Image (cartoon, helix red, strand yellow):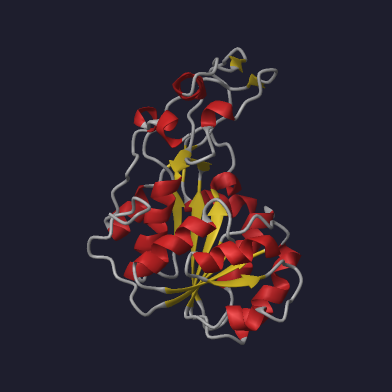
C-alpha cells in the first residue's frame, strides 16, 4: 500500500511524465500517489497560495486558472499524460486549454467527469444513456476533449464524492428536508477514486468511458442517518417517500472488469467515517 492507502502491488509509473490540472480535494492526493509510484508530476492550481505547498510535496507547481492562457501553461503541458480534475463546467472555458494541448507533448488524457450527466431513468444507467443529454455542459466538454487530434482520451465519471473532510453526515443542514429518501445513493470514497485513476494510467487504458461508483447502493434514508450517527450528529429530516420518486443507479463495474481493480470501500455502510475526522 502507498501512504495514501492505494495498493502499489504491480504498479509502476517510473519515469512517466504526468500533469495534473487541479490541486484540491482529489488533485493534491492524486499527485502524491502518482509521485509515489515513480511518476514525474506537474500540478497546476488556480491559487497562487497553494504553489509553495505543492513544491514542498515534491511536485512541480504551476498556476493555471482557466479560461485564461497563462505563460506557464505550455510548460505545464510538457508531459505525456494529462489528468484534468477541475470544477469548471463552461465548455467555452476549455478552449484555451484544448488549443494548448493540440500543440503539446500530451498523448493521453484523463478527464474526471461526473455521473450527473445521466438522467433519472428509474433504473440502472450506463454510458449510452448519457447520449440522451448531449446538451449537458459536461457532455459537451467530454466531447471536445475526446476530439483532440493525436490524443487518446478516457472519461471517468465519478458519482458523489466522500472521504476526508467530505463527511456525508454533514451534507444536509438541520433545516433541510431530504427528498426521495428511499431511492439509492451513488457514492464513491476518495481512496477508490485514487485507485481507479491509478489503474487507468498504469495500465494504459485509453480511449474509453467509465463510471466510478461503489457497488453498494443503500437508500438515502439508511445511509445519511448512519453517516450522521457515526460522527455524533442527529440524522437529517426526510420527506415522505413514494414508490414513484425518480432515481438512477450507477453501475461502476465496467472499469473493474477492464482493469481488475477491487474497491477498498465497496460497502458504503461499513466505512468508518468517524476515523477520518
The spot of residue 101 in percent (x, y) is 61, 80
Q: Position of residue 106 (x, y in %)?
A: 52, 81
Residue at 36% in and 71% down: 204
Question: From the viewer's perspective, is residue 30 above or below residue 213?
Answer: below
Q: Quadrant of residue 172?
A: top right
Location of residue 4 in the rendering, given as x and y in whole percent from the top left corner = 38, 52
Q: Visible in this render: residue 217?
A: no
Farthest left residue in view = 10
Residue at the spot x=44%, y=64% of the render? Answer: 208
**Number of numbered callouts drawn:** 0
Horizontal side, residue 105 vs residue 260: left or right: right
Image height check: is 272 above or below 179? below
Residue 117, position as x, y percentages in the image = 59, 49
Front residue (pair 117, 90): 90
Q: Considering only vertical position in the picture, is 72 above or below 58?
A: below
Task: Give the quadrant of the N terminus.
Answer: bottom left
Q: Visible in this render: residue 180?
A: yes
The residue positioned 28% from the left and 66% from the top of the image is: 11
Residue 276 position (above or below residue 89)? above
The residue positioned farthest toward the top in the image shown: 240
Locate residue 180 relative to residue 135 in the image: left or right.
left
Amino acid at each position: 500500500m502507498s501512504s495514501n492507502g492505494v495498493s502499489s502491488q504491480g504498479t509502476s509509473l517510473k519515469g512517466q511524465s504526468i500533469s495534473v490540472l487541479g490541486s484540491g480535494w482529489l488533485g493534491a492526493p492524486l499527485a502524491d500517489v502518482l509521485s509515489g509510484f515513480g511518476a514525474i508530476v506537474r500540478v497546476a492550481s488556480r491559487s497562487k497560495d497553494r504553489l509553495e505547498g505543492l513544491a514542498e510535496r515534491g511536485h512541480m507547481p504551476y498556476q493555471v486558472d482557466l479560461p485564461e492562457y497563462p505563460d506557464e501553461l505550455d510548460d505545464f503541458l510538457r508531459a505525456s499524460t494529462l489528468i484534468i480534475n477541475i470544477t469548471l463546467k463552461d465548455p467555452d472555458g476549455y478552449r484555451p486549454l484544448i488549443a494548448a494541448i493540440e500543440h503539446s507533448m500530451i498523448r493521453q488524457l484523463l478527464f474526471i467527469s461526473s455521473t450527473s450527466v445521466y438522467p433519472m431513468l428509474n433504473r440502472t444507467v450506463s454510458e449510452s444513456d448519457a447520449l440522451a443529454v448531449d446538451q449537458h455542459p459536461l457532455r459537451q466538454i467530454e466531447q471536445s476533449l475526446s476530439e483532440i487530434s493525436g490524443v487518446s482520451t478516457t472519461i471517468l465519471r465519478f458519482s458523489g464524492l466522500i472521504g476526508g473532510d467530505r463527511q456525508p453526515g454533514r451534507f444536509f443542514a438541520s433545516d433541510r428536508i431530504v427528498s426521495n429518501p428511499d431511492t439509492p445513493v451513488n457514492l464513491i470514497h476518495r481512496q477508490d477514486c485514487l485507485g481507479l485513476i491509478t489503474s487507468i494510467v498504469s495500465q494504459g487504458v485509453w480511449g474509453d468511458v467509465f463510471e466510478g461508483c461503489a457497488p453498494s447502493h443503500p437508500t438515502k434514508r439508511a445511509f445519511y442517518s448512519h453517516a450522521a450517527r457515526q460522527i455524533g450528529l442527529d440524522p437529517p429530516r426526510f420527506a415522505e417517500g413514494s414508490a414513484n420518486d425518480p432515481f438512477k443507479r450507477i453501475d461502476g463495474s465496467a472499469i473493474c472488469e477492464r482493469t481488475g481493480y477491487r474497491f477498498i470501500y465497496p460497502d458504503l455502510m461499513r466505512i468508518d467515517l468517524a476515523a477520518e475526522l
